[in-house]
Image (cartoon, rainbow, N blue to C red):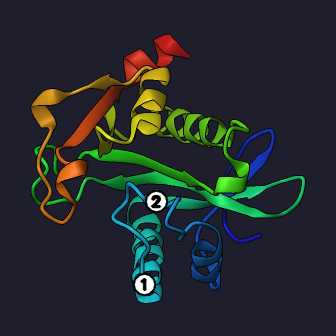
């Protein structure tokens, strides 16, 4: 199963391993899944993304974990933490949570289960006083989910990213502090 990162009632989250780029390409790299993330990626881009996450786990003890459904053993997505690394971001270096659950597993609560586990773990390990999430205004399901988690929109941290189309700008930022996460749980 690879290096276990977290486990929930229905999910196992493990570090990336050989072959995960193929799973990512097959299940997550579709136009519907990547609509708000800059579009479908090339295989070398997926490999680079996974290598970056592996390096982050080695260096900082966190990264994007592969999400596996316990009942089937199927790869259903990824979820985890990284540093905000867009040079245009006003919160460069802050911890950022992200997730992507494959389309045939939408509306089963897997994103919430995985994200809650990652936030619980991050705040329990005192990795940061707050954690951010980034999206676009157009990606309403994403920012609504952020609000459901108790995150607050930080308009002062929004920025334009020329690598995205006008319809996906500005990049909007939500944030939650450890104390608020504990209170909202």
Query: Could you classify mark 1 by the number of other residues whose Cα lies within 10 Å: few (under 14), some (14-19), or many (20 or more)?
Result: few
Query: Could you classify mark 2 by the number of other residues whose Cα lies within 10 Å: few (under 14), some (14-19), or many (20 or more)?
Result: many
Front of the two marks 1 and 2: 1
Is 1 rendered above or below residue 171?
Answer: below
Query: Which residue is pictured at 12% across the width and 45% down the height?
Result: 159
Farthest residue, direction right:
71
Query: Which residue is pictured at 48% across the width and 11% down the height?
Result: 183
Q: Which comes before the other along the chain, label 1 or label 2?
A: 1
Q: Which of the two residues, 184 or 58, is positioned nearer the viewer here?
A: 184
Residue 117 position, x and y percent, is 61, 38
Residue under label 1, please give it: 42
Q: Secondary structure at mark 2?
A: loop
Q: Is residue 32 left or right of residue 37?
A: right
In the picture, the quarter occupied by the N terminus is bottom right
Residue 160 position, x and y percent, is 11, 50
Tell me which corner region of the image, top left, top right, bottom left or bottom right, holds residue 37.
bottom left
Q: CA distance from mark 1 to mark 2?
A: 21 Å
Q: Which of the two residues, 26 or 48, is positioned nearer the viewer here?
A: 26
Count the marks: 2
Query: Which residue is pictured at 25% across the width and 50% down the height?
Result: 168
Residue under label 2, please give it: 63
Q: Is residue 90 left or right of residue 136?
A: left
In the picture, the quarter occupied by the C terminus is top right
Is 134 rendered above or below residue 27?
Answer: above
> Is residue 129 in sight in this rendering?
no
Residue 113 position, x and y percent, is 66, 37
Q: Secondary structure at mark 1?
A: loop
Q: Which mark is residue 93?
A: none
């Amino acid at each position: 199963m690879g290096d276990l990162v977290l486990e929930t009632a229905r999910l196992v989250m493990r570090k990336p391993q050989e072959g995960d780029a193929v799973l990512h390409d097959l299940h997550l790299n579709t136009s519907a899944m990547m609509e708000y993330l800059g579009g479908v990626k090339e295989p070398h881009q997926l490999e680079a993304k996974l290598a970056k996450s592996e390096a982050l786990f080695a260096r900082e003890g966190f990264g994007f974990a592969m999400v596996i459904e316990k009942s089937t053993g199927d790869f259903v997505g990824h979820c985890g933490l990284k540093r905000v690394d867009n040079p245009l971001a006003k919160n460069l270096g802050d911890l950022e949570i992200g997730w992507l659950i494959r389309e045939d597993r939408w509306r089963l609560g897997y994103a919430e289960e995985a994200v809650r586990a990652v936030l619980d773990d991050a705040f329990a390990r005192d990795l940061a006083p707050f954690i951010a999430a980034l999206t676009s205004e157009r990606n309403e399901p994403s920012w609504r989910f952020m609000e459901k988690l108790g995150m607050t929109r930080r308009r002062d941290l929004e920025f334009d990213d020329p690598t995205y189309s006008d319809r996906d700008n500005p990049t909007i930022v939500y944030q939650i502090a450890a104390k608020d996460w504990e209170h909202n749980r």
